[in-house]
Each structure stands twice: as C-alpha cells, then as structure tokens.
Amino acid sequence: MDRFQRAKDLQGELSDLRRDFHRHPELAFQEFRTASVVAEHLRRLGLEVRSDVGITGVVGEIRNGPGPVVALRADMDALPIQEDADHDYRSTVPGVMHACGHDAHMAGLLGAARLLSEDLREGRLPPGTVRFLFQPSEERMDEEGKSGATRMVEDGAMEGVSAVAGLHVGAHLPSGRIFVKDGPIMAGSDDLHIVVRGRSAHAALPHEGVDALVLAAQGILGAQQIVSRRLSPMENGVVTFGTIKGGVASNVVADEVTLTGTVRYFAEEVRTRLHEGVTGAFKGLEAQGGSVQVGIRAGYPPVVNDKTMATLARGVAEGVVGEEDVWEAEAMMGAEDFAILAREAPAAFLWVGAALSDPREHHHPRFDIDETVLPIASALLSGMADAMLRELSRGQTP
C-alpha cells in the first residue's frame, strides 16, 4: 500500500487530533496541555521523547541505526483571537483560537510519526534518525526577542541535524495542491517602535508648541516613499505601520506619539536600505523642533529553501498528489520562524492548499481549513523524511 493511501486511512484519527487541538488552543510558550498530548501520542508510537525543550517544546525520535539525522517540524501555538464559528470543534478558551493552522500542522506531523514508525517496524525506513520537532511560539517572540525556534535551537533540538522540512497549510490556496520552490519563499520581518516627541500647547495656539502628531504623520509619509524611491522596481520590500498612539485631548497639541510597524524583505541589502530609510524619515523631523527615538528589533529572517531539498520535496509531492497538483510557489511577504531552523541545516518548507469552498483568511476569527488535506500533510512529511535520509546517505561508507 502506498504512503498516501496509508495516510488516507488515518483521516478520522487525524481529524480527531486536529479538532482536539482546535478546541484547546494555547498561546505562545503556554502550550502545556498541547505538549502533553503530543508527547503522549509519540510515546505510544514507541518514540524516544523529550519534553520542555525550548520552554514548552517536544522532541521525539525514531532511530534506525547509524546514519544521518533529519528533522520534521510543526508549530504548536495559537493566537489571541476570539473565534467566530458555529462548528462543534470551536475553541473552548475565550479569546484564544488556532487561527493559522498550527492545529493541522501538529496533526499532520503526528500522522507522519505514525507512518514512519510503521516503516521502521516493517523494515522500510532507511538507516538514520528522524527527529520530530513540535515547536512552541511561532507567532511571537518573548521578552528577550526569541521565538520558539530560537529557544529550541538553543536547547539542542537541531544538534546533528543534516536536513529539516516543514509545511504550512494555506486556507487561501486551492485544496489538495502542494506549492514548492527553491530559494526565498517567505520574507524576513523586523519590528519598528518609534517615539516622536514635541511640545504641548493649546489647540488655539499651535505656534507655541511642537505638534508631535503632525511630525509623526510626516514621518509615516516619508517612510512610505522608501519602497517606491529607494528600492529598484525589481526588488521586494514593504514598510507597514500598524499602530499610532498619541495625544491627550482634541483641543491639545500632542506632545508625544508612539508608532509600531514592520519592515519586510528578502535580500539583506534591501533590509539595510529599509532600516536606513525609516530611520532617516523620522530622525529628519528633529529639524522641525521635535525629538525622535527609532527602535528596530530584529525579527525572523527570510525562509530560504535549499535547492536540493526543494527538488526532493517536489518529487515527494508529485508522488503524493500527482504532478498536476504540484505547483511552483510564489514567495510571500509573510514571515515564519522556520527560517531559524533553515539557517541550521538545508531546508524545505512547503505550502499545502487547504481552502474550503468559501476560503478563509489566516489570523481571522472565522479561520478554518479543509481537513481532507491532513493525510496529504502526513504523507508529505513522512515522505520527506524518507527522501532526506536516502539523499544524505548517498556516497557514505556503509
């Protein structure tokens, strides 16, 4: 029986797992119940399991003698969003929901662990070790600016790993299709925190103050020209401001305004120009009498697929859904901390289309997916582990 058919036989189990995770979402670095459920399933499959990795992460291993070590990753955290749904597996936690598909990622990876453990028992698994990374906190960084991937790397989760693979379900992508590309597939993103200070005055006497709100507006407009005037039309970059807060009353000139936002990029030189441009757009306001603090915190780097691993992934995907349903992915400006793992070892990150008949948006109160793609995720991840072990074993002395 082929891998995908074996995975399809797990449809009911995978849906049950995904719905259990969906009913009990947990925020970043608070995935205590989730991690316990994951660890118990892995132990029942006979895997060696280590908990509390990178604070709340779980690592499981299937060992099949000497050979390369490959890793498969799923993220576990939910989002601070109140779910707006009427299905029977809606979130039971007020203000928290799986609105990005991490519940599906975990179910898919647990299915892959099931398939690979069967391969081990039946003598089909290539020599080496498959390491399963159930990672906390993909959605945010902690107070030290570290995400779940960084914390797990610091805790040894990637030690000895020669290749790593992961995937993301796409509620906006045609269900059942797999999207693959080599090179950059998701953007890097850094956080902006800017404070513009002026001098308060009565609204009837604006000349006696320095209007921080007007200065901040000028800074925003100046920053928006960075992409159109400092980047080549052939380069990709985005500057976005998401919040602006300031002022105390409608009849008082604002003395302080705080802005937050992001810059997104694929190329390091573009990142440098975006940083310089934002800094210049706001520091230049000081000539008008204000003072400005520009803070830029490094976020996730771009996700860059290794060419060899992406080629392997395409072949595995074609074996799962057929060549006609494997498409070239378009690079996205969204960020993903899988990028941290991809800097530790050659990587492949893929998208699996999972749109319902009325497609949903990620990070939305009505987010949901087509659960029939869960076996695709399991077959794809387990197939990647097999393919990576075989590829990495080539040329090695037995």
Image (tube, rainbow, N blue to C red):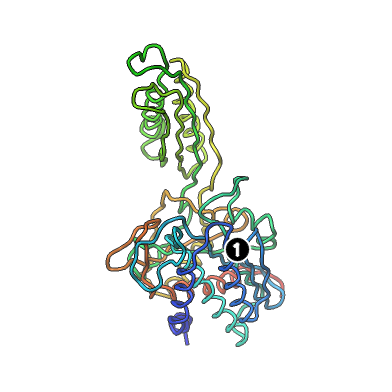
* Pick the front one: 205 or 45: 205
Give the total of numbered labels. Answer: 1
Q: Residue at x 38, y 40 (%)?
A: 234
Q: Amino acid at mark 1?
A: Ala
Label 1 residue SS? strand
Image coordinates for residue 348, horizontal then vertical, percent: 52, 61
> Looking at the picture, does residue 271 appear above or below residue 68?
above
User: Between residues 238 and 199, which one lies in front from this camera angle?
Assistant: 199
Question: Residue 236: x percent and y percent?
Answer: 41, 42
Q: Up-down: is 294 above or below 15?
A: above
Residue 390 lies left or right of residue 215; in this view the side is right
Q: Residues within 10 Å of mark 1 (few under 14, many from 20)?
A: many
Q: In the rendered image, which quarter is residue 127 located in?
A: bottom right
At 38% from the left and 22% from the top, the residue drawn is 252
Instruction: Identify residue for label 1.
Output: 163
Q: Residue at x 37, y 57 (%)?
A: 364
In screen coordinates, is 287 left or right of 122?
A: left
User: What's the residue at 49%, 70% (across, down)?
Assistant: 21
Which of the image's four quarters has the C terminus?
bottom right
Residue 85, position as x, y percentages in the image: 34, 65
* Residue at the outermost top position: 208
Describe residue 1's horizontal placement relative to residue 323 as left or right. right
- Residue sticking out furthest to the left: 358
How far from the left and from the top, in percent, is residue 352?
A: 41, 66
Residue 385 drawn above or below residue 213: below
